[in-house]
Image (cartoon, rainbow, N blue to C red):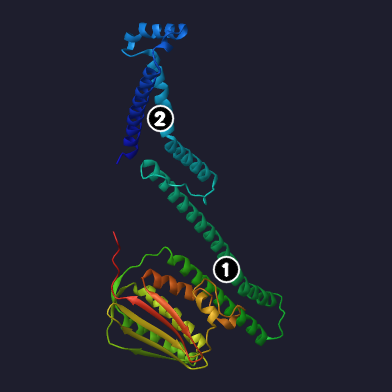
């Protein structure tokens, strides 16, 4: 729609009409004054010149000049709003170029200029959002580097320290030598696990979801059997309770396996004292529900909203006893979100439960 074009055309038509009306009114006023005024020498001479040139344009020269001046004045007067809006657009683009994104341009019309003002405001909002996201990304990257440096440095310092003792022969006997090497080996395993988790977390942001139809009950049953060995070693029994024999789900089996491995590892680690971890699966009309329950110490309520943040631990001391790299639950959240599912945590003095809800079918992407 060319609203501005028609607006300009109407501006000129209205200005021309008003000019003719004003000239007509002036002519009538002059006639009412009387003819004695026109007998004055200067006025008579000017009038005579006007009469001589009257046929040049087919209209008196004086009247033509007066009409042109009136027309220009009326056009300028009636176009003040449009000119003001154009100036506001220019000022808005200048502020946008300077990075001043908080002040919006006032939209005064619904024509092309108004649409342009609206688009400039939207562009400013989008640019402001992009800058905020960029700042958050930089802050997140700095926090990631800081946390990685901290978590890598701790076991690496221990490994270097104990190996230096071995290199300098600062041990009493073979037993103490074996003790040092065992500690260095355990620390290296922890370091390798942290690097593996970090690689897995960063890879999740770029790895696509390869969906296939899998039996979730079978997958969890296999995982429960695998964890039975770990559970026996940790003196923790993993009890698998399916509500049905078959729950078909469209998902990435490898990534779901990693999700529930992390949840079970977390539950076994924190449920040692109780000696039992429950793994339950059921279904609703559109979602599958998996619950991982341990009966260890409760998670502090203030820590629950932050559990899925990178490197966050409810125990902020970051010792080996707290276990994990601080990335396991972040990986879980990333995978569940990629499957368009949800994960919730509830914790009390009786139990701590992680509940994952996954759609049975892949959601359709809106075109």
Residue under pointer 2: 75
- Quarter that holds the N terminus: top left
Q: Position of residue 244 (x, y in %)?
A: 28, 87
Q: Position of residue 163 (x, y in %)?
A: 65, 75
Q: Is residue 305 above or below residue 141?
A: below
The residue depicted at 36 percent of the width and 41 percent of the height is 112
Q: Disc 2 or 1, which lies upstream in sequence? A: 2
Within 10 angstroms of label 1, few (less than 14), some, or many (20 or more) residues?
some
The residue depicted at 36 percent of the width and 17 percent of the height is 31
Q: Is residue 151 left or right of residue 365?
A: right
Observer-nearest of 215 and 42: 42
Observer-nearest of 191 and 141: 141
Residue under pointer 1: 148
Q: Position of residue 162 (x, y in %)?
A: 66, 77
Instruction: Kindly indicate the quadrant of the structure image that contains residue 147.
Output: bottom right
- Quarter that holds the C terminus: bottom left
Within 10 angstroms of label 2, few (less than 14), some, or many (20 or more) residues?
many
Q: How many marks?
A: 2
The residue depicted at 44 percent of the width and 87 percent of the height is 293
Secondary element under disc 1, as helix, strand or loop, is helix
């Amino acid at each position: 729609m060319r609203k501005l074009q028609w607006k300009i055309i109407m501006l000129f038509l209205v200005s021309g009409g008003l000019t003719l009306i004003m000239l007509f009114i002036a002519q009538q006023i002059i006639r009412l004054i009387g003819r004695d005024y026109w007998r004055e020498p200067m006025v008579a001479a000017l009038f005579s010149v006007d009469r001589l040139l009257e046929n040049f344009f087919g209209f008196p020269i004086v009247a033509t000049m007066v009409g042109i001046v009136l027309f220009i004045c009326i056009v300028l007067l009636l176009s003040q709003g449009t000119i003001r809006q154009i100036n506001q657009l220019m000022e808005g683009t200048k502020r946008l170029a300077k990075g001043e994104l908080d002040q919006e341009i006032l939209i005064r019309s619904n024509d092309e200029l108004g649409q342009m003002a609206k688009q400039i405001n939207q562009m400013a909002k989008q640019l402001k959002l992009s800058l905020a996201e960029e700042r958050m990304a930089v802050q997140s990257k700095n926090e990631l580097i800081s946390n990685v440096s901290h978590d890598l440095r701790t076991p690496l310092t221990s490994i270097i320290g104990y190996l230096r003792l071995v290199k300098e022969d600062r041990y009493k006997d073979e037993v103490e030598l074996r003790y040092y090497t065992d500690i260095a080996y355990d620390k290296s395993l922890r370091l390798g696990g942290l690097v593996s988790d970090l690689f897995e977390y960063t890879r999740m942001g770029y790895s696509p979801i390869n969906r296939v139809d899998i039996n979730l009950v079978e997958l969890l049953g296999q995982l429960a059997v695998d964890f039975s060995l770990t559970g026996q070693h940790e003196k923790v029994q993993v009890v698998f309770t399916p509500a049905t024999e078959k729950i078909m789900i469209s998902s990435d089996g490898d990534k779901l396996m990693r999700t529930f491995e992390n949840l079970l590892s977390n539950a076994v680690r924190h449920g040692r004292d109780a000696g039992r971890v429950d793994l339950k699966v059921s279904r609703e009309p559109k979602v599958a529900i998996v619950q991982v329950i341990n009966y260890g110490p409760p998670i502090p309520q203030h820590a629950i909203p932050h559990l899925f943040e990178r490197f966050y631990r409810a125990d902020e001391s970051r010792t080996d006893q707290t276990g994990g790299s601080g990335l396991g639950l972040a990986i879980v959240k990333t995978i569940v979100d990629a499957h368009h599912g949800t994960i919730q945590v509830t914790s009390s003095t009786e139990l701590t439960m992680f509940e994952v809800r996954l759609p049975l079918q892949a959601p359709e992407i809106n075109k």
